[in-house]
Image (spheres, grey):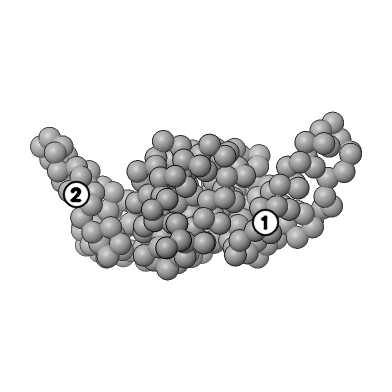
Amino acid sequence: MQELFHSHAAGDEGSDGEFMQILQRYIFGDVCYTGSLDNRMRELVTVTVLTALSTLPQLKAHVQASLNAGCTAVEIREAVYQCAPFIGFPKTLNAIGAMNEVFTQSGIELPLPSQKTLTDEEDDERYQKGLEFQAPVYGTEIADRYAWLPGEFAHAVPRFLTELCFGDFNTRTGLDTKTRELLTVVLLAALGGAEVQVKSHVEGALKTGNTKEEVVCALIHAGCYMGIPRLFNALNACRELLKEN
């Protein structure tokens, strides 16, 4: 609590001191001291999940906690930005607004330095650069799965995914591919009902250098915010990928 929020642990003060003691004992005691992830990565996980859940007051608190834990403003911004293809642009814009309020209050000058690497010099640059990230990890899975779509959509839908998820966001600097994939796993788990995609991205997270323990640790940490049912759904969907041999 001192490192993340510059405050002492909850006592009996306030109207709900007992609840806050339970919350802090579990999240910042039990969970934060189990597993290998450091507080910096745990806060990026938390920011991602709170963005997915659109819980803006808590997001503001954890944007500040992320800064206190050693995350850069650029890292936090990239974690929020890359939620857009999964939760939609409106919720992401709301999260960006909340995040920027904290940055401004902390004296961080906006806009932050650009992390864009695309030059926009060629019409298909987003697709080609996106494919460089997508193909080694996911192959042609999406194109194959949606080949049944009518007319031009059979080609357009997979292309949109390549251009948006991988072209517009994964080509950006500020977070490495390993971190982006781990954050995508917890983001999808937080949505609920996206277990097929969770499993696919757990496989992607492992391919990009995350260990099984790191993936499980991130999911369990995310479970503090998304709830145990969604945690168990994600773990069960990925059991064969994550269990020890």
- 193 horizontally vs 110: left or right: left
**CA–CA distance in space, label 1 to label 2:** 39 Å
Q: Which mark is residue 199?
A: none
The quadrant in which residue 196 appears is: top left
Q: In the orientation shown, which residue stands out farthest toward the left?
A: 151
Residue that numbered label 1 is attached to: 32
Q: Residues within 10 Å of mark 1 (few under 14, many from 20)?
A: some
Q: Secondary structure at mark 2?
A: helix
Location of the N terminus by quadrant is bottom right
* Front in this rendered view, residue 29 or 66: 29
Q: Position of residue 219 (x, y in %)?
A: 53, 51
- Identify which residue is drawn at 87% across, 43% down: 11
The kind of secondary structure element at disc 1 is: loop
Which comes sooner in the sequence, label 1 or label 2? 1
43 shown above or below 156:
below
Which residue is tagged 2? 143
Residue 141 on image: x %, y %: 23, 52
